[in-house]
Image (cartoon, grey):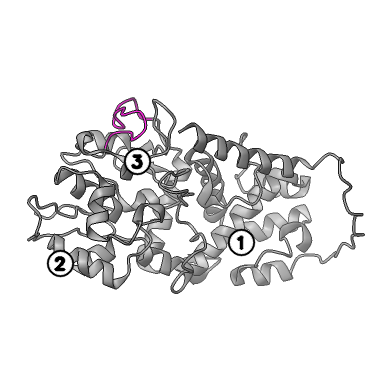
Amino acid sequence: MAAAYTWHPGSDGVNPRWAVPVQLLPDEIVSSWLVRAALAQGCDPLTFTGEIWPKWRIWTLDADRTISSERVTLLSLLSGISVAAFEAATLQPIASRIWGGLPPKKATWPWILALGARNTKRHGGLQYCPSCLAEDAKPYYRLQWRLAWHTGCQKHGCLLLDRCRACGAPVEPHRLLAEDRHVAVCATCKAGLGEGSPVPQSPDALALQRLADAISLQGHGVFHGQTLTTAEWFGLADFFISLCRRQNRYGTEAMRGVLNRLGAPLPDGLPVMAGAGVERLLVHDREKLLGCLWRLMDAGGDSLATALKEVGVTRQGFCNRREPLPSVLSSLVDSLPDRPVTRNRKPRQETGVPRSRDQVMRMMAKLRRKLEMVRR
């Protein structure tokens, strides 16, 4: 019987030109297969991919986003796995549904975790379930572990991890060596990634994860009585995430009252760093945000409209004029009081004047990422 899968079934028949055949497993992400195939042939992933594509430094890029037809055809010829199977193991099909068409080549893809690659080192972008890796006869990385709305493992009910528990390094299986033999090893300290006790995932974050999965697979969702495409639903999710983060940074008592009435009070410890999308946040930060998002989505449009009117929130208090407003909220926003605020332009900041808290937090986050790269 075929193994269960959510995103793609993997490959059945394999007839490679290499000594050791390696199947593409159900839901396996393509970079995981490349690393496993390299280790199975007894060589490092860097050497293996250098032999396949001598003029392409695949590990300095995000190999999971897409592979050109010419390169994937060559890979199919050598591995015996069909081109269609490899294409299904990339992130492009899901990203296209979220974007509403082909996503841009260079920008961060919405709701796909960003690797933050510099040469072959990374800031993050790949998660794992320690229990899955410990149980796997052949450990491998799943496609859903690259999705920003995934913070837990539905099979084991535990929080995913995006760092090695032993040394705190991000997960970088492409930097493993031939002697490591399998992918459930930290490339930095060689500790086993399947070791340690799992931490339970928040029920709200799990509920949001299941809903977003269903909408990604079905191609549509419902909010406020309207059917939304996958792209429209994730656009609405972006708007609510931005609302929560804006309220966390410099919110108003009125919006705090609305969130409390909807049963979505902001938890302590939400990330305050502005400018970093949900695609760059660590897993425990996303878990908190997605828990709030689930409460807002679950409350629905009618409850949101009632709470906004009871508390007396204005259009300006509800939405930022620089952010796109989802069409499903247009009539709701039009019904709110309109009280435009005229702001006088502040004089240009002189050198030596203390920076704002947001500016300092952004600078600190950049400095931490640079120091982390230098230490490894």
Mark 3 residue type: Tyr
Q: Considering the image in quadrants, where does the N terminus appear? A: bottom left
| Label 2 sits on residue | 77
Image coordinates of residue 293 in percent, x first then y, are 55, 50
Q: CA distance from mark 2 to mark 3?
A: 30 Å
Q: Secondary structure at mark 3?
A: loop
| Looking at the image, residue 296 lies above or below residue 218 | above
The crowding category of the residue bearing disc 1, from other C-alpha atoms within 10 Å (few below 14, some 14 to 19, many at least 20), is few
- Location of mark 3 (residue): 128
- Asked whether, in this view, residue 152 is left or right of residue 246, the answer is left
Q: Is residue 186 magenta?
A: yes
- Crowding around mark 3 (Cα neighbors within 10 Å: few <14, some 14 to 19, many 20+) is many
Residue under circle 1? 302
Q: Could you tell me which residue is drawn at 65 percent across and 67 percent down?
A: 324
Q: Nearer the viewer, mark 1 or mark 3?
A: 3
Q: Which residues are magenta?
A: 184-198
Determine the secondary structure under disc 2. helix
Quadrant that contains the C terminus: top left
The tag earlier along the polypeptide, 2 or 3, is 2
Tell me, yes or no, whether the highlighted magenta stretch contains residue 172: no
- The mark nearer the N terminus, 1 or 3, is 3
- The residue closer to the viewer here, 249 or 156, is 249
Distance CA(mark 1)–CA(mark 2): 55 Å
Q: Residue at x 31, y 29 (%)?
A: 190
User: Residue 251: x, y in percent?
Assistant: 74, 46
Query: In the displayed image of the protein, which residue is found farthest to the bottom?
Result: 101
Between tags 2 and 3, which lies in front? 2
Which amino acid lies under the numbered mark 1 shown in the image of this protein? Asp
| SS class, disc 1 | helix
Indicate left or right for 141 with 168 as reference.
left
